[in-house]
Image (cartoon, rainbow, N blue to C red):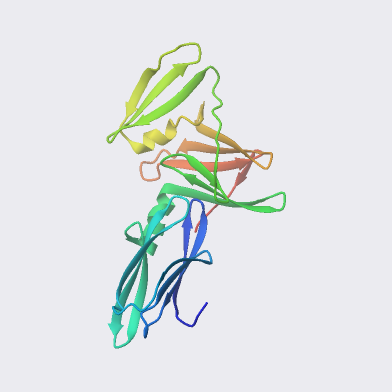
Amino acid sequence: MSNDLAGVWEVALSDGVHRIEFEHGTTTGKRVIYVDGKELLRREWMFKLVGKETFNVGKSETKATINIDAVSGFAYEYTLEIDGKSLKKYMENRSKVTSTWVLNLDGTDCRVVLEKDTMDVWCNGQNIETAVSTTGTEFKKSKCENCCVYKVRNTDAADDVELGRLPSASFCLAFHPQGEFVDDGTETHFTLADHNCCVKAVSSGKRRDGIIHTLLVDGTEIAECTE
């Protein structure tokens, strides 16, 4: 890394925590972006020293933008935006739509992320397959702009029957198809290194708090962490 290093940020996404480094040559106008140590973009001899650079980060190709603004004289300010929001605002919003757990399984550190809107589960950068454990019935979801339409299929029948329309995203979380209906909520099951894992979703009973998600590994609750 050269002496032109101008900014370093860490961005927590579902597939991992990504390190973004930005070099800016204020005499040559050079701009170089590294993501996780790999050069992603390089521009030489940029006559305009201010401006922005947009690129993608992570497996989901999340949009990122580095803004270069003049402060005074030859001083510059560098800010990172993710999906059009400041990094701070993005992370605050992300904490509302994801849950993250960090644990050690058989000597391996694991970072498990739940995307609450889709109920997708990630571990160390991999999208984990979750199992449907209901017996005789499969639940599936199709989306439209205004609501989620749930259909139920009997394994002995050929056709789907519409189960209902749920206009609220919070209700959708309670009836996600990749889960098992239980008395006090739903459970989404998967395995990590031969360990039985389950994300349990239950209503908090409070509109502001919404649905509470808990990770169980071999029946033991794992404490959620903040990033």
In the image, taking residue 127 as reference, residue 195 lies left or right, namely: right
Residue at image x 41%, y 38%? 205
Q: How many marks?
A: 0
Coordinates of residue 50 in the picture (x, y in percent): 30, 76
Q: From the viewer's perspective, is residue 137 above or below residue 48? A: above
Furthest residue toward right? 106
Coordinates of residue 29 in the picture (x, y in percent): 36, 79
Q: From the viewer's perspective, is residue 209 above or below residue 173? A: below
Q: Quadrant of residue 218?
A: top right
Residue at image x 34%, y 23%? 164
Residue at image x 53%, y 33%? 187
Furthest residue toward bottom? 73
Coordinates of residue 211 in the picture (x, y in percent): 43, 40
In the image, taking residue 203 as reference, residue 85 lies left or right, namely: left
Residue at image x 58%, y 37%? 198
Furthest residue toward front? 45
Q: Quadrant of residue 49?
A: bottom left
Coordinates of residue 66 in the picture (x, y in percent): 36, 68
